[in-house]
Amino acid sequence: MSLFWPRGALRFWQRNVYIFRRIFPESVAVNFLEPVIYLLAMGFGLGAYLSTIGGLPYLTFVATGLVATAAMFGATFECTYNAYVQMYYEKAYDAAITTPLNVEDVVVGEIAWGATRSVLYGTAFLVVVALFGAVRSPLALLLPPVFFLAGLMFAVIAMTFTAVNPHIDYFTFYFALFVTPMFMFSGVFFPLDALPAWVQVAAWLTPLSHVVRVARALALGAVDARHLADIAWMLTVTAALFPAPLRLMRRRLMR
Amino acid sequence: MRDDPDAVVRAEDLTKRYGPLVAVDGVTFTVRRGQCFGFLGPNGAGKTTTMKMIYCALPPTAGRLQVLGRDVRTQARAIKARLGVVTQENTLDTALSVRENLVLFGRYFDLPWETARRRADELLAFVALAERAADRVDTLSGGMRRRLMVARALVADPELLILDEPTTGLDPQARQLVWEKLRQLKRRGVTQILTTHYMEEAAALCDRVAIMDGGRIVAEGAPADLIRAHVGREVVELHGLARDGEGTAGLRRALAAVGDAADAHEVHGDLVLLYTADGETVLHRIRAAGVDVEAAILRRATLEDVFLKLTGRMLRD
């Protein structure tokens, strides 16, 4: 039952594009502003006290890491608050499943749209970072597909939570216990190499740390084989968790 | 299941359980092509659950259910491609325009953009919303939203239209407009299944009705046949029968006077209903016997009489 119909998922994705165009400037501005503020605060504020990290100006270090978080927030906001509003208040899922679309198509369309927003936010933020002179390699042009993969991963995780979330208020827990700690401890603001081994293991378990490593490597042109392992990590987690939101959402809606 | 080429929906012993709760308790019915079939019943009778199983939003626990010749358990997508559904709650995209709602829904049915746009414009004219095409849905009144729901359900030219309480909460003008549209669709041959709380709605639209209570169908048939079978042709209402404080004595005297002219009676507070084939005789006998009554009114029996007789007058929630 958890097979999906790609064309149906595309149709729901198209619907989300329409909605997005209607709410375009304001919703994007808010989500996009957050990493920019971090960049300014940390890059310039903290950067004034730190000369370099691992041979990089602190601004460059933070900026290349924040690129990954912009991608994370794109899919995460879409597949938590926005998806919940569409599902629970607007009843857009109930509407769609009276058509040839099944629950699985709707969920995959939503996940794909979350990943699309990751590409949009990640890329827009990458341009800002480039204006600050923090992009050093043309390999950065490979980042949008990485944003898409990262977006799929964060969208699948978020949709799994959304499918079982009993009330919109509980997203506070998702952010306070998962997103924010990950944001702080995934190597965005400080390198993880110098930390105790158990912290490094814990960080390795967080999805964001892998995105940060790949994004920074591509932006700086310092890619090696270990980054393939990061990509493999993201692919594995995404594929393994992918059936969960489909099945849980079917259970939630079809009763 | 009997083979019936005209059957659009065939349900046999259809059952839906939630743990110990039985929402739909083994119902059997057939809806034929071109019919308008109504489900009536108090809240919690199982109407909406039955509808959801028909439009494949809810898997049955037991029994058989075929819609348009296909099994709802295995061929939901193929069934849904040929349905139009108006759910009990509005499920419109409120941030989008009226027209966009229709076009995007057409896309769900895999209509090409061009076709979806053309259908949207035709349907907006049909439900008298053409002037609001560019407005956001959240600026529409309740009646307009309901009409838009009906239009949206028609976007892919469905063979079967399913309407769960299409006019609940609408004012009389809006209700009349929806009824008119549904009757037009019926004339074009679109099969319809609807649920309603309004007996006059069922009487105005439905060829057949099934009265549900407690998850079961307690009566099914053409409205006129149900009225004849369960309450007779006419009803005499006696108002204020016991106002002199005589208690049931007034009622006893009235019933004695009427004799066999009434087939049955029901008492609701100070209102007594006498079901009869010959109301004039009943009235005459009441007057001749000098029964002390505030008012005696003769009227035609309605579906509401059948409904209340079969499902009782207890509040359900």
Image (cartoon, rainbow, N blue to C red):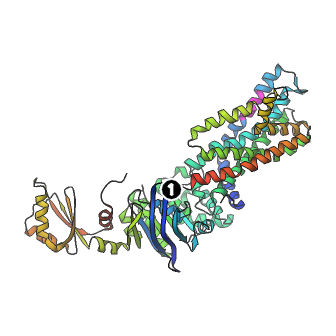
Residue shown at the point (26%, 73%) measured from the top left = B232
Q: Amino acid at mark 1?
A: Arg
Left or right relative to B254: residue B7: right
Residue B65 seen in this snapshot: yes
Q: Residue at x 22, y 75 (%)?
A: B277
Which residue is most to the front?
B20
- Whether residue B259 sits left or right of residue A120 in the image: it is left
**Does any portion of residue A116 appear in the rendered image?**
no
Query: Camera-side residue: A189 or A35?
Result: A189
Residue B134 % position (x, y): 59, 55
Q: Is residue A38 on the magenta stretch?
A: yes
In the foreground, B215 or B176:
B215
Q: Position of residue A112 (x, y in %)?
A: 72, 51
Q: How far across and how far down the image is residue B57, in percent?
A: 56, 60
Report the span colored magenta: A33-40
- Chain ID at mark 1: B
For label 1, the residue is B145
Q: Is residue B121 left or right of residue B176?
A: right
Q: Position of residue B226 (x, y in %)?
A: 33, 72
Residue B247 included in the magenta stretch of the image: no
Quadrant of the rendered image containing residue B285: bottom left
Q: Which quarter of the picture shows residue A27?
A: top right
Can you say whether A176 is above or below B114 in the image?
above
Residue B295 vertical placement versus A188 (above, below) = below
